[in-house]
Structure formats: structure tokens, C-alpha cells
Amino acid sequence: MRATKLVLTIKHLMYKERLLKLKLPTLKYRRLRGDMIEVFKILTGKYNINVTFSFEKHQDCRTRGHNLKLVNHRCHYDLRKYFFCTQIINTWNSLPESVISASTTDCF
């Protein structure tokens, strides 16, 4: 929000109007896109396995969608609910096969 106010000619506009003028996506969308790119890199082996998060892949062969679906464990405490691994699983599992099977992160 603050960075868009640095453009003096549109400083007086509301946040959504500034985004439209600058042709930028919202901050929430950019954060979600960045998270999906990181998960893609982790699951496709772009990072060192010893250093990264460990996601549990769904073992059931009858899953709909793509073959990189992640297991979503239930959280009983609010502390665990806000972890990176827990927050992104539903979004990741809902992505189409064409995005998951891409060779680069350009599709995100």
C-alpha cells in the first residue's frame, strides 16, 4: 500500500484505484503466488532436501487432479494453523494439472 503512494500523480487515489492505474495485482495475490512458487520448487527438487520443509504427499492413487497432492493434517491448536506448511496445502491441492506439471514457474 505504501509503495503505490510514492507515485505522486496518483497519491490521492484509493488503494484499489492506484493498483488499477499501475496495472498491479494486490499484495495478497502476490504473496499467494510467491508461496505457490516456493512449494513448486520444494516439491520438484529445486532446493536441497535436507534444508527445506518436508511435505507429506498423498499416497492414494485414486486422487483427482495432479499427482503432487499434499496431505492436509488437522490442527487442534491455533499455533500450528498459521504455519506455512498448513496454510498453503488447500490452495496447492486445488491447482490444475497443467500448472503442476509445468517445467518452469512461469505458469504461476
Image: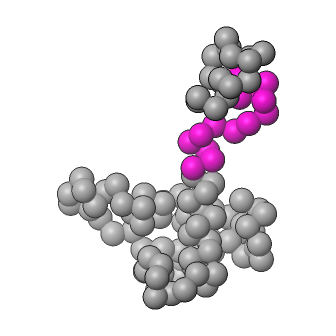
Instruction: Identify the residue at image location x=64%, y=81%.
Output: 46
Quadrant of the rendered image containing residue 83: bottom left
- In this view, the residue in front, 75 or 94, is 75
The quadrant of the picture occupied by the N terminus is top right
Picture layout, residue 1 above or below residue 40: above
Instruction: Identify the residue at image location x=77%, y=72%.
Output: 104
Which residue is situated farthest in the top direction here? Answer: 12
Please name the colour scheme applied to the rendered image.
Answer: one colour
Question: How far across and how far down the image is residue 54, in percent?
Answer: 43, 80
Instruction: Identify the residue at image location x=79%, y=33%.
Output: 23
How many marks the image carries: the answer is 0
Instruction: Identify the residue at image location x=29%, y=64%.
Output: 74
Magenta span: predominant SS is: helix
Report whether 82 appears left or right of 32. Answer: left
Q: Is residue 26 visible to the viewer in this orientation of the structure?
A: yes
Question: How far across and how far down the image is residue 25, in percent?
Answer: 69, 39
Inspect the magenta stretch and tell me whether residue 55 lies in it. no
- In this view, the residue in front, 52 or 63, is 52
Report whether 59 appears left or right of 81. Answer: right
The quadrant of the picture occupied by the C terminus is bottom right
- In this view, the residue in front, 15 or 76, is 15
State the extent of the magenta-drawn residues as a range. 18-31
